Amino acid sequence: MDIALCSLVNEEYAVGLVALLKSLRHHNPGVALPFLVYISRPLSAGARQQLEAAYPRIEYRLIERERYARCRFTNYRDWGMNPAFRYELFRETAYEQLIYLDADMLVHGDIAPLLAFRGALGACPMPPGEGMELRNIGGFNAGLLNIGRAVRTPQIWRQLVELAEANAWSGNQTVLNLVLKQHVQPLPLEYNVGTSHMTPEKLEGARIIHYLGKRKPWQADRPFDRHQMEHAGEAMCATLLQVWNAFAPGVAAQR
Ligand SMILES: [Mn+2]
């Protein structure tokens, strides 16, 4: 098999991944690729059961946390996950393409063209002004990465870790951009449509929705942050929550 899908979660983000997997099955029922779930600590039996019920080919990959212990970030966001764990993807050599999806994403359409991509690195460009340290130079959003074997090398992995250790960056995305800039090929924007500036037109065309921001749709007490509410508007936020809730863990599969 030459392609695998993957994500990176802890116990809390596993809820988001369950919804992502259910949405993938719903919109792409023919897809039966392996799905690698990167974790840094074992998940509870309950979380594993939900993931495995949502998708048939789950494989776990346990990250050695020590490898990333010296990588430091300023905007830690209280994830309970070291942002540098994302660099572990660059140690996987088994597949021609490794397609990474953030666990705060939802598949919203046909992703066959994304699965057909072959190349060093496919990612969606970020709008100007976004991406913290990248706001003036631009770059790609690291929530969706189609990573070819050419960049999954010990050299690139070491560059990522060394750069992350050298400076306190806002997150893993800046380091990924700085190291991989010359390798990236832009993917159509519909594969990573951020919720913060969502419009009805963008939602209509989205193949993958990315629930950006500090708050996440499974945090029922407050699923969106203020920035998101102001930019997308209350009605759009309600729609986005409805879309996510249709795939929430515990909700029976549609169709
Ligand atoms: Mn994300």
Image: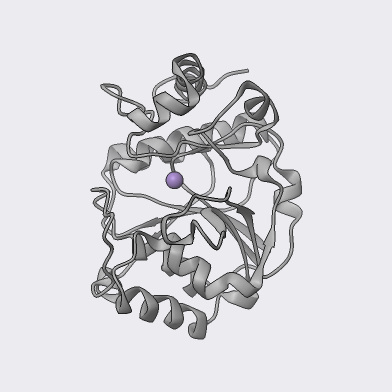
Q: Position of residue 79 (x, y in %)?
A: 27, 48
Total numbered labels? 0
Residue sitting nearer the eye, 253 or 124: 124
Instruction: Classify the position of ligand 1 by quadrant: top left, top right, bottom left or bottom right.
Output: top left
Q: Position of residue 189 (x, y in %)?
A: 67, 44
Q: Residue at x 74, y 58 (%)?
A: 117
Left or right: residue 165 versus residue 174 is: left
The image quarter containing residue 138 is: bottom right
Q: Quadrant of the N terminus?
A: bottom right
Q: Position of residue 249 (x, y in %)?
A: 40, 27
Left or right: residue 235 versus residue 112 is: left
Q: Residue at x 30, y 49 (%)?
A: 10
Q: Quadrant of the C terminus?
A: top right
The image quarter containing residue 69 is: bottom left
Q: Is residue 27 above or below residue 237?
A: below
Q: Can residue 246 be seen?
A: yes
Q: Residue at x 60, y 34 (%)?
A: 25
Q: Is residue 119 above or below residue 145?
A: below
Q: How is the image coloured?
A: one colour
Q: Can residue 35 be seen?
A: no
Residue, far bottom: 155
Left or right: residue 170 versus residue 119 is: left
Q: Position of residue 76 (x, y in %)?
A: 26, 54
Residue sitting nearer the eye, 156 or 62: 156
